[in-house]
Amino acid sequence: MDFAAARKVMVDSQVRVNDVTDRDLQAALLSVPRERFLPAERAFAAYAEIEPEIAAGRRLMLARDLSKLLMALEPLPGETALAIAGPYAAAVLARMSLKVTAQEADPAVLEVVAPALAEAGVEGVVAPFAEPVGGGYDVIVSEAAVPVRPEAWLAALRIGGRLAVVERAGPAGKAVLYVKGASGLSRRELFDAAPPVLAELAPAPAFAL
């Protein structure tokens, strides 16, 4: 399979046509080998308009949705970024000259994506999704959805930092952008999306008499 040709088709048919106009982002998407973030036997699915499985139920986000999330973040060279459940996003941001950490909760997922992350110059770490590693980030992004507002992720942003994520409490979800200001958070809804939800972040059930 000609992955370079498939990559160009993906950018032309899934990214550019969805109003993703950032040239640097387009160039990064054209150069990062998305197939390297899947097991070899599923690499053929990397550029289809689906959410292919990495391992243990974790999936890559649709290229269309991820590119729109990343453009909304307006990442800048030299900024620090944390990609939570987002290894492919991490590599794309690294190609855009950000300093990126990729956080996974399941070692099985990191085992699949670690070689590609290393090639991209991204540090991969294993830690619970509810506990972001480090802090003071300019940018945080996730390829998975969250069931509730991720307060711990927002706390890991510096003043002026941005978080792009899909919030999904039912069959449909909404991609949102948070910006952390000195006096609080702003929230802007971006587009509809429905990637798989990170079950680890679901609130504990409450019982009432």
Image: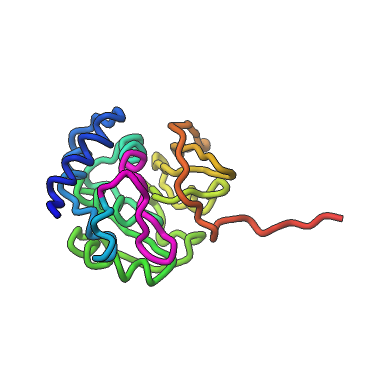
Looking at the rendering, which quadrant does residue 27 occupy? Answer: top left
The range drawn in magenta is: 47-66
Total count of labels: 0
Asked if the magenta segment contains residue 43, the reply would be: no
Whether residue 36 is visible to the viewer of this picture, yes or no, is yes
Whether residue 138 is visible to the viewer of this picture, yes or no, is no
Image location of residue 14, percent across then percent down:
28, 36
Image location of residue 198, percent across then percent down:
50, 56
Task: Tell me which residue sits at (34%, 67%) in the image.
Answer: 110
Quadrant where the N terminus is found in the figure = bottom left
Q: Which colour scheme is used?
A: rainbow
Task: Tell me which residue sits at (29%, 27%) in the image.
Answer: 19
Q: In this view, does 123 lie above or below 11?
A: below
Image location of residue 117, percent across then percent down:
24, 62
Q: In this view, does 55 lie above or below 174?
A: below
Task: Tell me which residue sits at (41%, 46%) in the image.
Answer: 158
Looking at the rendering, which quadrant does residue 111 occupy? Answer: bottom left
Image location of residue 184, percent across then percent down:
52, 37
Task: Tell me which residue sits at (22%, 67%) in the image.
Answer: 115
Q: In this view, does 8 lie to the left or right of 155?
A: left
Q: Is residue 95 above or below residue 172?
A: below
Asked if the magenta segment contains residue 64, the reply would be: yes
Quadrant where the C terminus is found in the figure = bottom right
The foreground one among 102 and 111 is 111
